[in-house]
Amino acid sequence: MNKIHETDKLTIDAVKKVAPSVVSIVISKQLEKAKTSAMPFFNPFSLDSAKEPSESVKIGGGSGFIVHETGLILTNKHVVHDVDADYTVVTNDNEQYDTEVISRDPVNDLAILRIKATNIPTVDLGDSSKIELGQTVVAIGNALGLFRNSVSKGIVSGLMRSISASLGAEGQTEHLRGVIQTDVAINQGNSGGPIIDLNGHVVAVSTAIIFGAQNIGFAIPINWVKQDIEDIVKHGRIIKPFVGVQYAMLTKELQKKYDLPVDHGALVMRDHHPASPQAVIKDSPADKAGIKENDIIIELNGKKLTEENDLMDELQKCGVGEKIEMKILRDGKEVTAETELEERT
């Protein structure tokens, strides 16, 4: 009789605990059908073309997991980014539910859905701040949109990574900071699925892979979304503070390349994408504080801003309506600006 290794037993038990709460998300869209009646011999005046009623066509899939007994499901924002698509949740016991997208996180690649269901199993959320390099983790998801509850195992390969991920919508990309790198096999369709530890606690959300590379995947720490879930339960929406600037975090390389006075801070600048807003959004808290393009925000509430301590990281520690103080470098001189954070819509 083959003896199961202790680590394998922990993995099996963890998967058994979480798998019932993992769901597949089917993405469908209404497409019009064209009805064409052609004569035996081509006659441009006798060709009759008419539109038939639209039909629902599956165009993709992703993963998610149930985080609250009221039917709340967590997934990636890029899985449900298309507001014109329909989303169906298929649970582990093959039940199908129409789905409402409750909220898309304006900052991170996260979204929360809701299904009308009762007596549904939920996951236990872990503490992603305690994740360590080399730790064993397991991914569960809808691999390739075909294989529900596929399980893959690996380790945590890196912490606090910064990546730019494609949203799959009109060429838009999203910059994610502080994500977890893992060598767990994450396939298309796994997006939005849970990354769990050997205690069966969800510690991260699968979010991106690097095409052409082997065993390089990224996941969003679960601690980022705990407040989102509380916001949904209490307020029905995700509440995030908003300051209203486009920026790039400075490094020694950027300082040297652009002959800048400092190698740290957030340089206020517009994105090069044609659809991007101005560097300082009109009537935003930053605009009201007098922030200008090419300013360098070097401190927020006394905390030095660096590549490791991003402006967005510090903002997420603040609340809507909170007053903040920013130290700014402008034309070689330090100035101080104060403003009140508003709710991002």
Image (cartoon, rainbow, N blue to C red):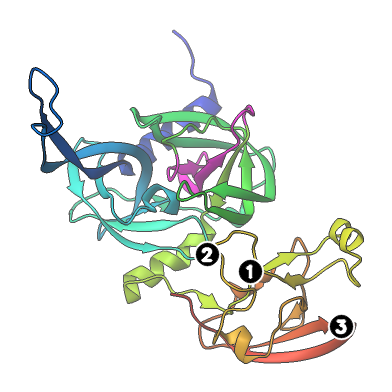
Q: Is residue 276 above or below residue 171?
A: below
Residue of label 2? 107
Residue of label 3? 331
Image quadrant where residue 333 sits: bottom right
Image quadrant where residue 84 sits: bottom left
**In front of the other: 42 or 280:** 42
Q: Is residue 243 above or below residue 48?
A: below
Label 1 Cα neighbours within 10 Å, binned few <14 / some 14-19 / many ≥20: some
Q: Are the residues flagged by discs 2 and 1 in contact, CB closer than 8 Å?
A: yes
Question: CA–CA distance between discs 1 and 3?
Answer: 24 Å
Q: Amino acid at mark 2?
A: Val
Q: Is residue 50 above or below residue 289?
A: above
In this rendering, position of residue 256 left or right of residue 117: right
Question: Where residue 154 appears, x then y in whole percent?
Answer: 58, 31
In this rendering, position of residue 245 left or right of residue 28: right
Which SS class for mark 1?
helix
Which stretch appears magenta?
191-215
In the image, is residue 110 part of the stretch drawn in magenta?
no
Q: Amino acid at mark 1?
A: Met
Residue of label 1? 312
Question: Where residue 117 appears, x then y in whole percent?
Answer: 18, 53
In the image, is residue 206 part of the stretch drawn in magenta?
yes
Q: Earlier in the sequence, mark 2 or mark 3?
A: 2
Question: CA–CA distance between discs 2 and 1?
Answer: 9 Å
Q: Are the residues flagged by discs 2 and 3 in contact, CB closer than 8 Å?
A: no
* Residue located 89% across and 70% down the image: 262
